[in-house]
Image (cartoon, grey):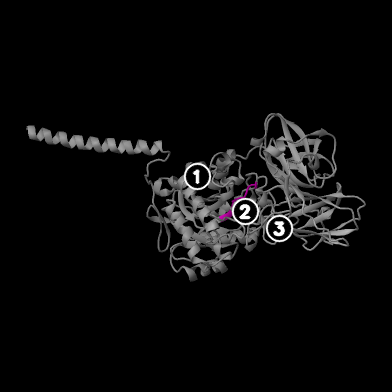
Amino acid sequence: MLSTLNFAHRIVARWLVIVLVFIGLISLSFAQGTPPAVAAHTFAIGDKDFLLDGKPFQIRCGEIHFARVPREYWRQRLQMCKAMGLNTVCAYLFWNFHEWTPGQYTWDGQADAAEFCRIAQEEGLWVILRPGPYACAEWEGGGLPWWLLKTPGIQLRTQDPNFLTPATNWLKEVGRELGSMQITHGGPILMVQAENEYGSFGNDKEYMGKIRQALLDAGFNVPLFACNPNADLRKGYRDDLFAVVNFGKNPQAGFRALRAVQPTGPLMCGEFYPGWFDWWGEPHHTGDTKQYLTDLDYMLSQGASFSIYMAHGGTTPGLWTGNDHQFRPDTNSYDYDAPISEAGWVTEKFNQTREVISKYLQPGEKLPDPPAAYPVMTLAQFALTETAPIFENLPTPIADTVPRNMEAYNQGRGCILYRTTLPAGAAASLDIKQVHDFAWVFLDGKPLGVLDRRYPGRSIALPARTAPARLDILVEAMGHINYGKEMYDLKGVDGVKITGADNISLDKWQVYPLGLDDPMLAGLKWKSGAATGPAFWRGSFNVDKPADTFLDLSNLGQGVIWVNGRCLARFWNIGPTQTAYLPGVWLKAGRNEVVVLDLIGPTKPLLAGLDKPILNELHPELDFSRKP
């Protein structure tokens, strides 16, 4: 009897130790900020289907970028996706949005990717993560940090250690932040994409293998995949990365191309385009809705998976807009003619998409009603009554023997002013080998003309001078190129020379970096009244109850606008966008301050708030540098 009791005591003691150890491990896990690795579901790629908990699962996905949606609106936009019939959302991570300064990562506020994933999971949506390192997405530099360009000759998106080392560090950081959000840990992330449309850029399988390995080393243990358009599927292809194909129409052709490369596995369109993005100076894009719905129906009927790019485009904030190859700057509106509008509204395309998807729901599945839209208001016209001319608000200059690109002065965006003194002499010509992107030229404060990246080879005539004269070259950067081989896109000027009768040689320059950041705005010296030339303008409006609105900027010229200290958008009177979406959550009851940098000056310093956007109004006659 005694031995039996001793044996029982030993069994109880052993179980007690096991329980205490388990509790200790859980406590340690939570103390380190990560939940215990408990998977409530499983996800795998089968011979014919995606498998969720071992059963066939058709991914009905749509792209939505949390960086382009106010954090306070994330849940409503995700509820819209769910109501439209999606069961998954696709989310890019823009590397430079999280690491603007090398080694300093931001994951809070608008950059809280983990919270976006948690909300998606709470709303019954799975997540496909696209961490890059390259994204494209009409975003500044395609998501690549500007500081990479500080290394002369760096080879982006290659095995160059100057690129691959920081890219690997970035993916390691993503794993640290989001690894616990994988389905293997009880989270919503089903799959993770390696790179993005690499076949449209290169053909280095080993490079793709190193990106894949970096994701594995970062702790990602869900399926990894790569996406490419039809014609580029074989470039850089690896059989250890699941392949999906991107197209805007004709899924039959797209899936044939995919099957030629990947004979088995589920069929998936990684980017299915219902519309397109916009460039300054070109008409607003809309998609062929009838074709889109027909192709969507086909994919659903065939059991193929897809991701609608974009389900909701939103707005590119502030200076984060990209620049398509061959220099076509992107607008801040990323409406994309998507089913969910820029402001999160139900559209006819939304209802039609929901109707098509409703025909293919699983037994017992029911779509929720769309959530209510956020209220919208108009604003009576208000004036900008104070000004701060740029030339009267310059920072301490940097002395240099030759004007260099922005990045050489540790600057990633904004404007930059190059200043020197010309000696007295005969008429001459100012020639600049490279202008990225616009350069306004002044002599003793008098405007002489504009050099424009759209029209290379131009020069500026310099008049004869009876005395030394101050030469100013004010350059604006419109966002680093986000696509193609031109992504090595240094901003500012290169190869400045004066030619003419006296062949002037200059070796004394003063350079003024104008980053358009918070410290610069805080230091502006304001005065009442109007200004001529490039200047900041300030005004305000009052609101009783904040709501969404669309600021009418059609009276302004070309530049940037801030509201309550938040960099809202670029503007350009040539269109097609003539408004800036202003979410009500960024306003306050009472007085709201507006600051405008207008580089060419407004026709009238008046703004207003509309209840609808103006997305397709072109004015080529207002272009400050029209093609002759």
Badge 1 marks a residue whose secondary structure is helix
What residue is disc 1 on?
Answer: 117
Residue 174 appears at what percent x and percent y? Answer: 49, 48
Q: In this view, does 593 lie above or below 569?
A: above
Front disc: 2 or 1: 2
- Whether the residues at callouts 2 and 1 have beta carbons within 8 Å, the answer is no
Work out how far the residue at label 3 is from the one at label 1, CA to CA, in angstroms: 33 Å
Which residue is nearer to you in this view: 530 or 78?
A: 530
Residue lying farthest to the bottom in this orientation: 260
Which residue is nearer to you in this view: 573 or 346?
A: 573
Front disc: 3 or 1: 3
Q: Is residue 381 above or below residue 178?
A: above
**Label ID, residue 301:** none
Residue 325 appears at what percent x and percent y? Answer: 67, 61
Q: Residue at the spot x=80%, y=51% of the render?
A: 440
What residue is disc 2 on?
Answer: 150
Name the amino acid type tagged 2. Answer: Lys
Query: Taking 306 as reference, is 22 left or right?
Result: left
Q: Is residue 351 magenta?
A: no
Work out how far the residue at label 2 is from the one at label 1, CA to CA, in angstroms: 33 Å
Q: Does the magenta stretch include residue 314?
A: yes
**Label 1: how many residues lie within 10 Å, few (<14), some (14-19) or many (20+)?**
many
Q: Residue at the spot x=14%, y=35% of the render?
A: 8
- Whether the residues at callouts 3 and 1 have beta carbons within 8 Å, the answer is no
**Label ID, residue 328:** 3
- Name which of mark 2 and mark 3 comes first in the sequence: 2
Q: Is residue 539 above or below residue 214?
A: above
Residues in magenta? 308-316
Residue 134 appears at what percent x and percent y? Answer: 56, 56
Query: Taking 80 as reference, is 570 left or right?
Result: right
